[in-house]
Image: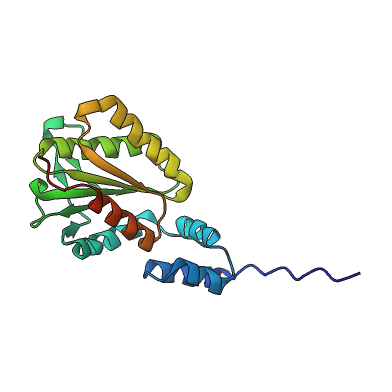
């Protein structure tokens, strides 16, 4: 009787944390996963669980310059016309063409973790749409960044709003189902290449 092959051991939590840190700095997913002796899908699942959504805000803010935009993670859109309930919309990050003013908005980012209720996702997308309607001369892109396990929920939220708002839906929306910075960057690049940023 032959001995059973030895099962690979699970990586130490310290090694997983270091691997996630490398991914956040832009290292290659496949390379890091191979070094850790886990699948890329497993490493991505760990990344999505470990990375706090708010830690992506400064990354997105800095990434704006790579695309020729100005990023701001603390921008507030004035929505005082909505009354006393909500006077401002504070997305996780906003990109601008030039100076950081509402009129120059080209992209709005919302980063949501696992525990975000559907009404928050829908509310954020709806408020981003209000911003796009207020400034109709520029195409505003909306990026919903979520863990892979929540991609379907984020996608259906956008699709429901798009369907029922009809011609009042003014955003070009992209759902990104990972917290991996490389994949986020690629999805943004693909979305920006898809359509012009100025409406005709």
Q: Is residue 38 visible?
A: yes
The answer to which of 86 and 14 lies nearer the viewer is: 14
- Name above or below for residue 114 compared with residue 28: above
The N terminus: image quadrant: bottom right
- Name above or below for residue 7 compared with residue 132: below
Q: Residue at x 8, y 57 (%)?
A: 99
The answer to which of 6 and 109 lies nearer the viewer is: 6
| Residue 22 location (% of width, % of height) | 42, 71
| Residue with the most extreme right position | 1
- Is the image coloured rainbow, by chain, by secondary structure, or in one colour? rainbow
| Residue with the most extreme bottom position | 35
- Name above or below for residue 158 compared with residue 10: above
Q: How many marks overall?
A: 0
| Residue 9 location (% of width, % of height) | 67, 69
Q: Residue at x 30, y 31 (%)?
A: 161
Quadrant in which residue 53 is drawn? bottom left
46 relative to 195 in the view: left or right: right
196 relative to 111 in the view: left or right: left
Quadrant in which residue 115 is drawn? top left
Q: Is residue 115 visible?
A: no
Q: Residue at x 16, y 59 (%)?
A: 69
The C terminus: image quadrant: top left
| Residue 92 location (% of width, % of height) | 27, 51
| Residue 54 location (% of width, % of height) | 34, 56
Q: Residue at x 20, y 29 (%)?
A: 168
């Amino acid at each position: 009787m032959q001995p059973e092959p030895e099962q690979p051991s699970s990586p130490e939590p310290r090694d997983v944390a270091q691997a996630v840190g490398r991914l956040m700095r832009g290292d290659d997913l496949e390379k890091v996963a191979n070094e850790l002796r886990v699948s890329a899908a497993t490493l991505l699942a760990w990344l999505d669980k470990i990375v706090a959504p708010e830690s992506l805000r400064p990354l997105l803010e800095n990434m704006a310059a790579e695309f020729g935009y100005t990023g701001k993670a603390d921008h507030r859109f004035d929505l005082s016309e909505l009354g006393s309930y909500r006077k401002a919309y504070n997305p996780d990050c906003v990109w601008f063409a030039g100076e950081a003013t509402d009129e120059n908005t080209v992209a709005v980012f919302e980063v949501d973790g696992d525990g975000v209720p559907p009404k928050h996702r829908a509310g954020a997308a709806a408020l981003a749409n209000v911003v796009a309607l207020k400034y109709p001369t520029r195409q505003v892109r909306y990026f919903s960044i979520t863990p892979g396990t929540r991609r379907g929920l984020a996608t259906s939220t956008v699709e429901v709003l798009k369907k029922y708002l009809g011609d009042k839906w003014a955003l070009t929306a992209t759902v990104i189902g990972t917290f991996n910075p490389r994949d986020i960057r690629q999805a943004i690049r693909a979305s920006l290449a898809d359509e012009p940023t100025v409406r005709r």
